[in-house]
Image (cartoon, grey):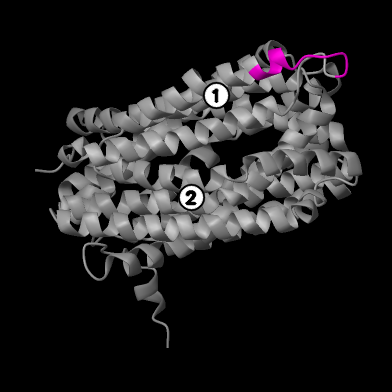
Amino acid sequence: MINIKQLLAPKDMTKGTPWKRIIEFAIPLLIGNIAQQLYNTVDSIIVGKYIGDNALAAVGSAAPVLHMLLVFFVGVATGTSIMVAQYFGAKDKESLSRSIGVSITITAIVSVIIMIIGTLIVKPFLTFLNTPESIIYWAEEYLKIFFLGIAGFSYFNILSGILRGLGDSISALVFLLISTSINVVLDILFVAKFNMGVGGVALATIIAQGISAILCFIKLRQMKDIFELNLEMLKPVKEYVVKLIKLGLPSGLTQAIFSFAMIAVQSLTNSFGEMVIAANVIVMRVDGFAMMPNFTFGNAMTTFVGQNIGANKMDRVEKGVKDGLKIAVGVSTIITIILLTFGKHLMALFTNTNELIELSMHMMRILAAGYIAMAITQCLSGVMRGAGDTLTPMWISFITTIVLRVPIAYTIAHFTKSPEYPAGRPESVFVSLLIAWISGAVINIFFYKKGKWRDKAIVD
């Protein structure tokens, strides 16, 4: 009989066979990441089927603005996860408790700031991105509702990150599945029955995420034997705030770099017209699922490495990295084959327009090989972050996105302008992304082998 209490308990990844610990942690995390992706995918399917292709394009145009303003939460979540994993591995209850408390307090402050700033800059930013007039109102409505309910999103991501840092990927999965189910039901109710449009999609998402955040908090309150969560621990003690910023800021900046690249490329994408914008949305939704194993194993390696470095078990780290890479590359290869074989059927979930399905599949074929390269990138970046080296992944992201991807995209578009394609070939967006992915894998291998990440642990 399955022991539910034991199943939901935090996992000590400093013991047992490395590849088994990694897989045990990664499987529920992968299912959870897929469920997380369902938020965006279900939104897109319902919008595309019930409202139309232009509404689908509007949701896609909103993405760069959304990502730009969520960089702060990425930084806090990453810094917290690293601190939790290392202090948990070191069995330091005091530091573990204060790290968690500080992250909860900072998240509250940042949520209020983003809620105010986000609602004010939405329209100017969409205009700056050359968002077509036919979709800008929908994009603005979607974003404003999302930002007003930002607290649910932020706390779910922070608190589920804490659970994963403790090795508990099961609880985060259960809460996410509950939340995703609620999101699907509310999507259908608000859009199909009440005709609330893209605003209904955003409202469904923030309600579902708020519920999942509450469930995560209740679970953490029950872990009194592992850490304390009280008013004393919520005080922003300087030592832990500094550590959180030091670890989280590079990851936040990494996300900012991605967001800047998305904004720059989205502006280019918008110049190709509504059909290409909608195709880009479809490809990115399918891409989200294809990339899930890579992100999953990256997160698994962060927790595995963090706990084992905290426990001063470097031999397990080395063995775990080799095992993690083999698993991630193998899974990514299988996913790539599935995409190339059944991709059109996936595209057809989002639209009934054959031209849009063909265009989306054409772009997906360009990206296919890049998923295997990203398996390497995410694993090795996760290793470095778990060790406390968040600066190196930041610089690698800067090189691959700002130095390589954005200039390459605009250069290809410029040199492929023609009467048929006055703004250039739309393939430029995807070819540049493929080049960035492959380059990132090569650079990550170099810095991993260089080995400076081994000296970045925050515990003594």
- Secondary structure category for the residue under label 2: helix
**Is 132 left or right of 108, judged from the image as shown?**
right
Mark sitting on residue 143: none
Which residue sits at x=67%, y=39%?
A: 366
Which residue sits at x=20%, y=59%?
A: 316
Percent across and percent down for residue 17 are: 26, 70
- Image quadrant in which the C terminus is located: top left
Which residue sits at x=29%, y=49%?
A: 229
- Image quadrant in which the N terminus is located: bottom left
Q: Amino acid at mark 1?
A: Arg
Mark sitting on residue 294: 2
Q: Nearer the viewer, mark 2 or mark 1?
A: 1
Q: Nearer the viewer, residue 292 or 121?
A: 292
**Is 67 left or right of 357, judged from the image as shown?**
left
- When the figure is inspected, residue 426 is found, relative to residue 341, above or below; the finding is above
Give the residues drawn in magenta, as a range.
Answer: 412-420
Q: Is residue 257 visible?
A: yes
Mark sitting on residue 405: 1
Q: Is residue 419 magenta?
A: yes
Percent across and percent down for residue 363 are: 72, 38
- When the figure is inspected, residue 202 is found, relative to residue 127, above or below; the finding is below
Q: Amino acid at mark 2?
A: Asn
Bin the neighbour count of mark 2 within 10 Å (Cα to Cα): few under 14, some 14-19, many 20 and up.
many
Earlier in the chain: of badge 2 and badge 1, it is: 2
